[in-house]
Amino acid sequence: MRPLRPLALPRRDSRPDGCPLPGGQALTLTPSPPTLPRADVVGVTGYCDTYRGLRSYKTVWAQHLDDSVRRMFYKNWYKSKKAAFRRYKANFDEAKVKADLADIKKHCTVVRVLAHTNVAKAGCHNAKGQKKAHLIEIQVNGGDVAAKVDFAYNMFEKAFSVDTVVAQNEMVDLIGITKGRGTQGVVTRWGVSRLPRKTHRGLRKVGCIGAWHPSAVKWTVPRAGQMGFHHRTELHKKVYRVGKEGEESHKATTEFDMTEKVSAAVVPRPCPCPHCHSFPQGLATTVRGT
């Protein structure tokens, strides 16, 4: 399995509290799906320092994992034997778990919990929707390593909301994947100007990809290839409000803008599934642009 990307950690804002939204900047309403009633934090992993940076040392999983999480370990859940974590659950040893946690306390410097989303409550759990949960690492800050490990272990099979990770007037870094656009040419991919109309063998090309010598194409020359579906990180996004449904903060209004804003993703999709009709969730508001 690919290494999991950690969630963006909050950064303290240098602006005074209650600072109005700067002019010319847009807000992004990010709906936060509700947590799973039975389990949300399903594991803890420890990282130790090496001369090459952080290295994953040991991971401890909870005893009960939802099927949406176990789907993460299969490409085709329907044809699989669905045996992931079956023996781990049947032979769960509390003493071994305590020994692994003590080992993390002894050798690790960074502690992160393994959390997953609840796709059943996000309005997409139907016959044609997504049934595989999103698994992510969230770093635990504050206190010594032993306190971090104990806090993570106490959160096993428990739910938490978005306001426990980010707070109002904090600066965060957003990590995501750009929209995939497949294989594209140099004009679309790099913005190269087209050649004249009567150019032989096509005009959506680079006129010259290099000199005769050195007989190599440099990496700076635009070439066709993959466009989109890249890992990107946007820095310094301010959280202006973390709202809760049923409260005034959920409308995302301010004294400067009284318009009630509701993200389209907040409204659940029509689905006969009984889970999709109840849609309690939070609403995180971030700023787009710098």
Image: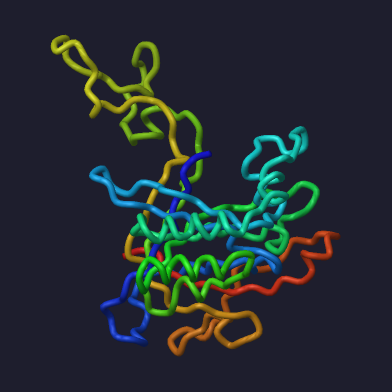
Q: How many marks?
A: 0
Residue 282 locus on image (x, y percent): 59, 74
| Left or right: 184 as drawn, with respect to 73 | left
Residue 84 shows in this picture: yes
Residue 73 locus on image (x, y percent): 62, 41
Q: Quadrant of residue 168?
A: bottom left
Residue 205 locus on image (x, y percent): 35, 22
Above or below: residue 152 compared with residue 15: above
Above or below: residue 117 compared with residue 186: below
Q: Quadrant of residue 157?
A: bottom right
Residue furthest bottom as drawn: 255
Comparing 217 with 230, the one in front is 230
Residue drawn at 36 percent across, 16 percent down? 198
Residue furthest front as drawn: 95
Residue drawn at 50 percent across, 51 percent down? 59
Residue 114 locus on image (x, y percent): 53, 57
Residue furthest right as drawn: 272
Comparing 39 with 21, the one in front is 39
| Left or right: 175 as drawn, with respect to 50 | right
Residue drawn at 77 percent across, 37 percent down? 78
Name the quarter where the C terminus is drawn.
bottom left
Comparing 99 with 146, the one in front is 99
Q: Quadrant of residue 154?
A: bottom right
Residue drawn at 42 percent across, 45 percent down? 231
Residue 265 shows in this picture: no
